[in-house]
Image (cartoon, rainbow, N blue to C red):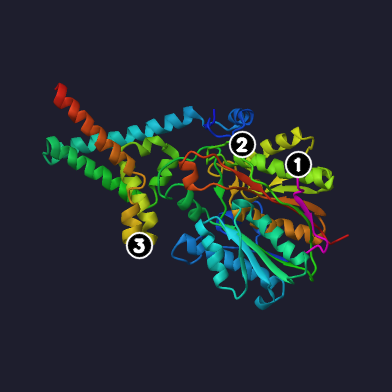
Amino acid sequence: MPKTNANNPYFNQNYLEYVGRCAPRTNEVRTLYRAFMVGGLICCIGQFLRYLFSSVLGLGGDELSGFVSMVLIFMGSLLTGLGVYDRIGKFAGGGSIVPITGFANSVVSPAMEFRSEGMIYGLAAKMFIIAGPIIVYGVASSVVVGLLYWIFG
Amino acid sequence: MAEHTIYFKNQPRIVSAYAVAGPKEGAGPIGRHIQKVLLDDKFGEKTYEKAECKILRSAIEGAILSAHIEIKDVGALFSGDLLNQIISASFAAREFDMPFVGLYSACSTMSEAMMVSSAFLDSKQLRYAVAATGSHFSSAERQYRYPLELGCTRPPQSQWTVTGAGACVLSSVGNGPKITAATIGRVVDFGVTDANNMGAAMAPAAANTLWMHFKETGRCPDYYDLIVTGDLGVLGSKLVKELVWEKGYDISQKHVDCGELIYAIKEQEFQGGSGAGCSAVTFCSYLYPKLCDGSLKRILFMPTGALLSTVSTQQGESIPCIAHAVVIESAVK
């Protein structure tokens, strides 16, 4: 069903229902399969890095998590800069957006895009245009969770 | 109710047409007809907006040269584009020493430009006018959708904005295919809110203009060799045929959509081409020569436009659309 605005005096119910029936469907089986395969692969890479850093570099705890995140963010940013990440995204959809590499992509891509409007009003101001809501609502919900811990923990 | 259709007694002529397009359009089904195909869509410029402006300028220059007239002969430039404040058209107009009438009806700008310039020419107030418009995939994505490098998928109802521009020189004194009438579109909104489903949003506006046109002229679809829409896409084309059928007109034998002509539909283009440049490039490169040599006798050229902005959709508004129709007839008997 297409999204409808019940307060909109123009919406033609019959037409919108008909459009909803005719509109081409995403092949969910194919897209879900691709998303999970790629998302899972990225997570496996992360796990492998974890193993590598803990056994070769002898890292542990928060430092280990930090290093793994750093490398994944770097890879996401590098692939975005090289123009490869969007091709992965077209194939994988949610599988490449959701992991931390996708977060890096969502910050680097607008930074690249809006550089033409200058370093301050373009690149720096618009860098968080996609990731902004994630940061805002992520931090806000962590405050709520923290409060709940403090009250009930 | 006032009539929507106007008739041009003196029948302005389209004396030349010129299209400039990007490599993707050049590789499409009508690519070999496009007068100038670029090697890359940045056209040597630093930004996509500057490239879009240069492409439009290039099309205008090409049309003026093909008409064998000079810039000082042109009475006015009638143009617009998809970018905020129509900067492509305005900055392109800056480069030409001629009066400028800025227009906007989204992807319907080409027929709007032809229609408005024809009114000036029909009254013989101007001898020559240029009608032009264009669009660019990357600048449209930046303005309306997501950054180019963002790894996200496109839904199956989406279209691909054409990188290209088309320009025509129209005249009250020259020779060429004639503009005999036009039906001015009205804004129609059936409540579609999905900015990725433009075809469904625009089909009602196209159907409304067609119905008005047939009703007021007393003609039926068979009068025309082709009824050309701009970028309804596969779904929109199906919907417009059904909506017009409900009013008693069958356009299925004569209908063709520029969005389906400009790209061979493969994975990423889904519903086909869109953008102001879609109808402009298709007309100037493919349809115009056929009107000149007489293989097309009479066409109804009606690109459709979606009159939304990023702000309006974010505020939950639906998408109002419009379609201006122009009747173009070959001068060959």
* Pointer 3 residue: A118
Tell me where residue A53 sits by quadrant: top left
Q: Position of residue A80 (x, y in %)?
A: 36, 49
Q: Where is residue B173 in the image (x, y as percent from the top left)?
A: 79, 71
Magenta part of the protein: which range?
Answer: B1-13
Majority secondary structure of magenta residues: loop
Earlier along the polypeptide chain: callout 1 or callout 2?
Answer: 2
Residue type (three-letter) at the residue carrying disc 1: Trp
Subunit under mark 2: B
Circle 1 packing at 10 Å, graded few (<14), some (14-19), many (20+), is some
Name the element at disc 1: helix
Which one is closest to the eye, mark 3 or mark 1? Answer: 1
Residue type (three-letter) at the residue carrying disc 2: Phe
* Pointer 2 residue: B190
Q: Which residue lies furthest to the top in this view?
A: A152
Which one is closest to the eye, mark 3 or mark 2? Answer: 2
Q: Which of B122 and B225 is in front in this view?
A: B122
Quadrant position of the C terminus of chain A in the picture: top left
Horizontal placement of B324 versus B84: left or right? right
